[in-house]
Image (cartoon, rainbow, N blue to C red):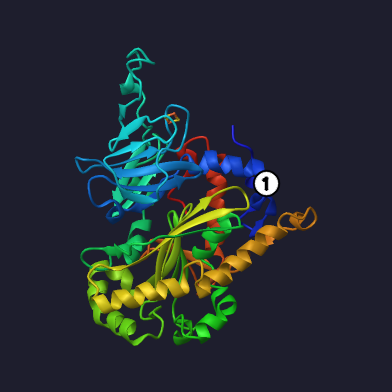
């Protein structure tokens, strides 16, 4: 039975108890109730394009190996040796015909089956039933537009049911043009001493900090915010499990780099035709899919996973991406822009990390943690928009998605079944 956490999250009044950012027991409950159940993003299909391609990741704190087997099927397994529990594959990604455990040499095929055991005949007298000791697969693995997701919970609803209205918002990042996206080769991987939720909530709706925290980056043309009329549209939107900051339909979040601005102008109509009438209302540009998959496409195009590593530590894995159909020159500008904006040394990323880190540190003080956090911006000033099929704020800044993110978090934390989670309620 899960511990009651609803008292810590008051979404009606926009108050949040700071224990949820540093309590070890609450963190353990998150791993069980959220990360061992929810659909979680693993990787983009192109990152395991060929038979034998593999990709190491985590689902919560469980190491997971995604691999395309020799028949071309993508599988995902606990990256844990069935013998003494060693982590089998230590590389981030690559291509392999088999995975050999470093400890005693148990060897697994790309389909997860145990295919070799040293001294099987002599030491085990050929009595070990190897068919029972393959790598443990995830309960379900499904894809949406090239995005590979998995869950450890056999009772989880189908992926499309879980995503619900979030799919259209994902399309704005990963399916703007024919062919979807291209993911640039290298991965950024680093650790931030902050709670994972502070990063997830920021990407999922914190338009408020952009013009303040990132002002120097904006003034140096790393972002487009100064080019956007603050009075034009834009909204903070919650659609099922996704929380998104949207600009107005005609606002372009691209920084003032001529090649990129020209590209966006050239493909604007094509993208609108592809994404349909909702795109005539809004231009989504940064968001978080609950719980820990975030994305941004404002010149810097990055998608990332916030892997929890304890209540006050998160390991980030991030990639730069762009439309596959974009010209080479555009791709190069986006690649460079992503390094400069959203990477461990990126201008925006450094501002954000510093703030999240301090928010985490202050939640440790016995007196400061008695004081609730304030998520009250825009209470009563959002509504369900039938055209967008989402909760949208009246003004372009709001904490409506912060309140919904933590309401969803609390439902997951307490729910004993998926029916209690009400996953399509933002
Ligand atoms: S722990 Fe992997 S072979 Fe022993
Ligand atoms: Fe930021």
Q: Residue furthest right?
A: 367
Residue 37 in picture, x, y percent from top left: 46, 40
Asked if residue 39 is positioned above or below residue 172 in the image, the reply reads above
Residue annotated with mark 1: 23
Q: Is residue 373 left or right of residue 92?
A: right
Front position in the image: 11 or 410: 410
Residue at 56%, 52% in the rendered image:
407
Q: Is residue 142 left or right of residue 414?
A: left
Front position in the image: 198 or 250: 198
Q: Quadrant of residue 197?
A: bottom right
Q: Quadrant of residue 327?
A: bottom left
Say whether residue 112 is visible: no
- Name the quarter where the N terminus is drawn: top right
Residue at 52%, 54% in the rendered image:
315
Residue at 52%, 61% in the rendered image:
401
Residue 64 in picture, x, y percent from top left: 41, 42
Residue at 25%, 52% in the rendered image:
49
Say whether residue 329 is visible: yes
Q: Residues within 10 Å of mark 1 (few under 14, many from 20)?
A: some
Residue 153 in picture, x, y percent from top left: 42, 36
Asked if residue 228 is positioned above or below residue 157 in the image, the reply reads below
Residue 65 in picture, x, y percent from top left: 38, 43
Q: How many marks?
A: 1
């Amino acid at each position: 039975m899960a511990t009651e956490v609803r008292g810590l999250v008051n979404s009606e009044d926009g108050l949040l108890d700071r224990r949820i950012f540093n309590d070890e027991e609450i963190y353990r409950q998150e791993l069980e109730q959220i990360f061992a159940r929810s659909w979680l993003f693993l990787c983009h299909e192109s990152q395991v394009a060929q038979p034998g391609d593999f990709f190491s990741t985590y689902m919560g704190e469980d190491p997971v190996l995604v691999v395309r087997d020799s028949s071309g099927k993508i599988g995902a397994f606990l990256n844990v040796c069935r013998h003494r529990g060693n982590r089998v594959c230590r590389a981030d990604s690559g291509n392999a015909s088999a995975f050999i455990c470093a400890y005693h040499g148990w060897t697994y095929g790309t389909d997860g089956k145990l295919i070799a055991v040293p001294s099987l005949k002599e030491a085990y007298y050929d009595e070990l039933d190897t068919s029972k000791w393959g790598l443990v697969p995830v309960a379900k693995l499904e894809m949406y537009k090239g995005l590979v997701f998995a869950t450890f919970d056999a009772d989880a609803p189908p992926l499309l049911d879980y995503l619900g209205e979030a799919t259209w918002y994902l399309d704005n990042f990963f399916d703007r043009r024919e062919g979807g996206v291209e993911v640039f080769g290298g991965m950024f991987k680093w650790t931030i001493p902050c709670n994972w939720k502070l990063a997830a909530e920021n990407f999922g709706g914190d338009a408020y900090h952009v013009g303040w925290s990132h002002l120097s980056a904006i003034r140096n043309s790393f972002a487009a915010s100064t080019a956007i009329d603050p009075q034009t549209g834009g909204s903070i939107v919650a659609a099922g499990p996704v929380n998104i900051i949207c600009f107005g339909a005609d606002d372009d979040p691209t920084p003032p780099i001529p090649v990129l601005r020209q590209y966006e102008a050239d493909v604007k109509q094509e993208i609108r035709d592809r994404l349909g009438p909702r795109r005539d209302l809004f231009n989504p540009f940064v968001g978080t899919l609950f719980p820990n998959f975030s994305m941004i496409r404002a010149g810097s195009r990055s998608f990332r996973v916030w892997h929890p590593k304890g209540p006050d530590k998160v390991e980030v894995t991030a990639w730069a991406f762009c439309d596959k159909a974009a010209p080479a020159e555009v791709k190069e500008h986006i690649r460079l822009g992503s390094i400069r904006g959203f990477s461990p040394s990126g201008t925006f990323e450094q501002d954000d990390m510093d703030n999240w880190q301090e928010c985490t540190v202050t939640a440790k003080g016995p007196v400061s943690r008695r004081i609730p956090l304030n998520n009250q911006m825009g209470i009563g000033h959002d509504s369900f928009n039938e055209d967008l099929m989402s909760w949208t704020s009246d003004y372009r800044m709001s904490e409506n998605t912060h309140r919904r993110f933590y309401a969803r978090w609390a439902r997951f934390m307490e729910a004993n079944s998926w029916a209690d989670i009400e996953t399509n309620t933002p």
